[in-house]
Amino acid sequence: MLLDCDTGVDDALALILALRSPELDVLGVTTVSGNCHVDLATRNTLLVLEQLRLPQPPPVARGCDRPLHLPLQTATDVHGRDGLGGITALTGADGRRRYPEPALTPTGATGPEPMVDLARAHGQSLTLLCTGPLTNLATALALDRRAMAGVERVVFMGGAIRVPGNVTPVAEFNIAVDPHAAQAVLDSGLPLVMVPLDVTTRTVLTEAALQAAAARRFGWLSRLVLDLTAGYMAFHREAVGVAGALMHDPLTVGELLAPSLTHKTPLSVGVECEGALTRGMTVADLRSRPTGRRPAPNVEVAMEVEAPRFLDLFLERATG
Ligand code: RIB
Ligand code: CA
């Protein structure tokens, strides 16, 4: 798989889950502006990779630094100014940073090329996992549609079908940041699986559950996940009234690890790109129609999730 992310806290948790799951082969990571600027998302990705003490970390390539047509909007209120829930400010008893700047560096390639190169090299055996705005994928499609059309599947976190948005009353953040890119992906004909707020807002990792799991299996990994989620949980408690971390991006990894965790419905989905109140809204045609008169679906949308089973899987892999 290739992980395309705007590393923020839940992207970091998704990266940890993917890299601690032997079923998955993370061939590469591309970063994109979203939660924070792509330079910070790249540093954050490298910092987390370094903390995972991997014998051979996957290459990390810096992707697009702004949406196709809109000015970049970030989410530092949710993910902290460092994009990692403030962990870069943590120090040990010796006054040194608990999570220092990474020695790992990104590859020289930037923009959509790394994604296209992997698609060309791996074709049908490659799954793209997108947990940020879809700017890189849309740009890669414009660069080499044929190569991108050869991938096995694209699983992306984004959208809201029957539930409110999170960054506006109707828009989910990843889509709202770059609605034009999301529309291009939905128009692409690629095999798409969408993991929207409808299911990710049900996967809430509570402080109590994480602390209990960390106490059972304590070590550097549990410490990292506890540190990463502390600020993110505080945000959700104050701003959203949820006593825990919404596991948006890790659930997309769960979709690869155990597709039976969610129930998916083929839907015809479009993106509002202009509306003053509705820009970034994902609009699904839910009208009941006789089979022959339904619009052709362009995406499989996860509308139900076995949240407890997913959270158990996450805690089993991401503590220790
Ligand atoms: O709306 C949630 C999504 O936006 C997540 O991917 C989060 O990391 C942010 O990118
Ligand atoms: Ca993200």
Image (tube, rainbow, N blue to C red):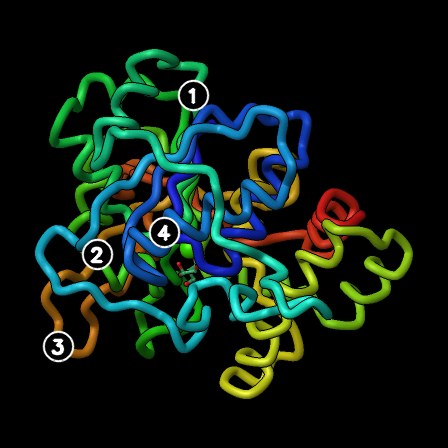
Tags 1 and 3 touching, CB below 8 Å: no
Mark 2 or 3: the one toward you:
2
Mark 1 nearby-residue class (10 Å; few <14, some 14–19, many ≥20)? many
For residue 126, which numbered disc appears in the image? 1
**Three-letter amino acid code at disc 3?**
Ala
For label 4, the residue is 132
Q: Which residue is drawn at 39% across and 46% down?
A: 5
Residue 183 locus on image (x, y percent): 19, 48
For residue 94, which numbered disc appears in the image? none
> Left or right: 191 with respect to 205?
left
Q: Earlier in the sequence, mark 4 or mark 1?
A: 1
Q: In which quarter of the image is residue 81?
A: bottom left
**Three-letter amino acid code at disc 1?**
Leu
Q: Marks 4 and 3, how far apart in space?
A: 23 Å
For residue 276, which numbered disc appears in the image? 3
Q: Residue at x 23, y 17 (%)?
A: 147
**Three-letter amino acid code at disc 2?**
Asp
At mark 4, the secondary structure is: loop
Mark 3 nearby-residue class (10 Å; few <14, some 14–19, many ≥20)? few
At mark 3, the secondary structure is: loop
Q: Marks 2 and 3, how far apart in space?
A: 15 Å
